[in-house]
Image (cartoon, grey):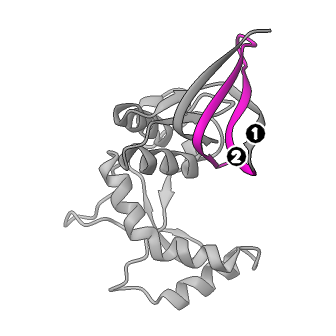
């Protein structure tokens, strides 16, 4: 069976929110990027169905209080190290999502509304969210896909990574199959980021 070989600077495997961000940040830094997923990027996994976003506002919120409330809401199964990072980075992620064209509900004065709640934690609600497939062009996943394509990220839909390629103790790429055609493809990359 013949195989194709593709070269790129960065291969990102997994196209949920982590994969979207990794691909975007690598592309913004000037790398050639392939984002690969076994599904259709923007419709697969749970990230496309997101309808809200937690935002920590340092001027208004007590980070320790939020940290403990999220830990309690997650029945202490949340990794505390990563939770703290997520809370602290949420203002930056809010700005990233805004730059991608996401819009959040606003109050009467035009400020972002944090009137929705997860338990007793205030969260932002995405505007114009809808269930797939009726209004795909209004969803979280569609907007992320559109942004990534416009940024120049190569999207490999329905590509099943079967094996990582190692050389001298480093991962240098991946081999996989295009699900629809059965074609074997080898992707050689300077860096591989696993977001599965």
Residue at left offset 38%, top offset 38%: 147
Secondary structure beneath dot 2 equals: strand
Image coordinates for residue 115, horizontal then vertical, percent: 41, 69
Asked if labels 1 and 2 touch by Cβ distance under 8 angstroms, the answer is yes
Could you say which quadrant of the image residue 79 lies in?
Answer: bottom right
The answer to whether residue 184 is left or right of residue 116 is right
Give the alpha-carbon distance from disc 2 to disc 1, as whole Å.
Answer: 7 Å
Tell me the residue that label 1 is attached to.
Answer: 164
Foreground pick, 89 / 75 = 89
Residue 42 visible in the shown view: no
Tell me the residue that label 2 is attached to.
Answer: 171
Secondary structure beneath dot 1 equals: strand
Residue at left offset 37%, top offset 44%: 30
Q: Judge the density around disc 2: few (<14), some (14-19), many (≥20) Cα neighbours within 10 Å.
A: some
Could you say which quadrant of the image residue 42 lies in?
Answer: top right
Which quadrant does the N terminus fall into? Answer: top right
The answer to whether residue 170 is left or right of residue 100 is right
Residue 54 visible in the shown view: yes
Q: Residue furthest left?
A: 109
Examine the structure image and report whether residue 175 is included in the region drawn in magenta: yes
The answer to whether residue 97 is left or right of residue 133 is left
Mark earlier in primary sequence (2, 1): 1
Image coordinates for residue 122, horizontal then vertical, percent: 47, 73
Examine the structure image and report whether residue 103 is included in the region drawn in magenta: no
Foreground pick, 131 / 38 = 38
Q: Relative to residue 37, is residue 62 depicted above or below? A: below
Q: How many circles with numbers are drawn on the protein? A: 2
Image coordinates for residue 59, horizontal then vertical, percent: 32, 86
Which segment is the magenta one? 169-196
Residue at left offset 60%, top offset 28%: 40
């Amino acid at each position: 069976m013949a195989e194709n070989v593709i070269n790129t600077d960065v291969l990102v495997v997994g196209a949920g929110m982590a994969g979207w961000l990794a691909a975007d940040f690598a592309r913004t830094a000037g790398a050639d990027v392939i984002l690969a997923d076994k599904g259709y990027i923007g419709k697969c996994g749970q990230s496309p169905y997101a309808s809200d976003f937690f935002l920590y506002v340092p001027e208004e919120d007590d980070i320790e209080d939020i940290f403990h409330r999220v830990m309690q809401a997650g029945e202490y199964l949340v990794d505390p190290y990563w939770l703290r990072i997520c809370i602290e980075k949420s203002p930056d992620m809010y700005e990233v999502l805004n730059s991608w064209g996401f819009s959040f509900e606003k109050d009467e004065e035009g400020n972002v509304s944090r009137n929705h709640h997860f338990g007793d934690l205030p969260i932002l609600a995405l505007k114009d969210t809808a269930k797939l497939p009726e209004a795909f062009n209004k969803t979280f996943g569609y907007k992320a896909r559109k942004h990534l394509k416009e940024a120049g990220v190569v999207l490999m839909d329905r590509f099943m990574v079967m094996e990582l390629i190692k050389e001298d103790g480093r991962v240098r790429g991946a081999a996989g199959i295009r699900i629809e055609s059965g074609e074997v493809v080898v992707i050689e990359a300077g860096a591989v980021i696993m977001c599965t």
